[in-house]
Amino acid sequence: MNIKNVTIAGAGLLGSQVAWQVAFSGFEVTVYDYFEKGLATSKALHKEYAELFVTTRGATQEQVNDALARLSYTTDLAEAVKDADLINESIPESVEIKQSFYKELSKLAPEKTIFTSNSSTLVPSQIVESTDRPEKFLALHFGNTVWDSRIGEVMGHPATSPDVYKLICQFSKAMGMVTIPLHKEQSGYIINAVMVPWINASLDLVVNGVADFDSVDKTWMLAHNVERGPFAVMDLVGLDLCSSINKLWGEQLGDEAALARANYLDENFISQNKLGEKGQEGFYSYPNPAYKDASFTQ
């Protein structure tokens, strides 16, 4: 099977990045979102990415114009998937929402269509029973920002077809990623299994009143000679996603510390629509966050 037509379900920040990278790599891409507003935001992001690729990544105007021409947008799921060889899903990080989506998707998608999830923490076995094609369901997970992190984590479940797994590994490479195969299911995959505890330990320092967020970032940046600390990374990932992950773990595992982190983010940021870089404000204000100033670590 050749993959030519790709549907990206979920037009948020990460879904829009995946859609752009896939289109730039030569595939026909349909972006699906339940809301017209989400599609409008995605279209605006794609214009930003086109300019970014020309100004900072050496792309030609012809290349980005071709990528833009390969992108289409719809709020009609049946229309979005009618010719899809592959679907990559980036909808909200909720078991119930994803299960509902895959039940509907299974009714509409052609038999040929492979289903992949870009979930940050959920594993395929938590969702697969909501699909009608367990052998064609697996995870294909990307890091933020897709073209800089360049990872495509591929994780199946016990019933995933080895041939389908191999094909998705090849697709990941074809869209410019370094394919990272996982041999068994693991919540958080590799990147989040390492990053989430780091983020949570940093949040605990602030939630428990040990230190201010900028002190934590300065410490990390100086100690490791890096451009971002954990709170800058949270802004990049999205504070709503950080909250959702902690809320999910808190509710499923009875983890009071996780619930405290989620409550802190909800009360101090999300309730005020401070979602991080995508909302122009989070722990820092954008487009010129304080941590990028040379004086920040002085």
Image (cartoon, rainbow, N blue to C red):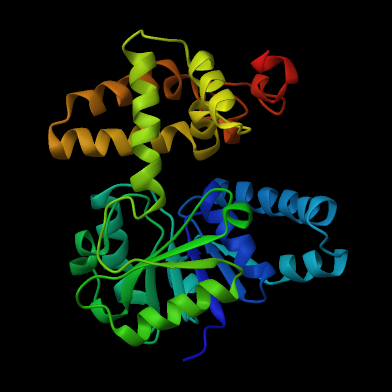
Quadrant location, the C terminus: top right
Residue found at the far left of this picture: 254
Question: Which residue is more in the foreground, 32 or 54?
Answer: 54
Q: Which quadrant holds residue 68? A: bottom right
Residue positioned 67% across, 49% down in the render: 45
Determine which quarter of the picture holds residue 200: top left
- Rendered location of residue 43, percent (x, y): 66, 53
On screen, residue 84 above or below 149: below
Q: Residue at x 14, y 37 (%)?
A: 253
| Above or below for 84 versus 228 | below
**Number of numbered discs:** 0
Q: Is residue 263 left or right of residue 39?
A: left
Q: Position of residue 183 (x, y in %)?
A: 29, 69
* Left or right position of 257 against 141: left
Q: Is residue 266 visible?
A: no
Residue 198 image point, x, y percent: 38, 33
- Residue at 57% x, 53% y is 149
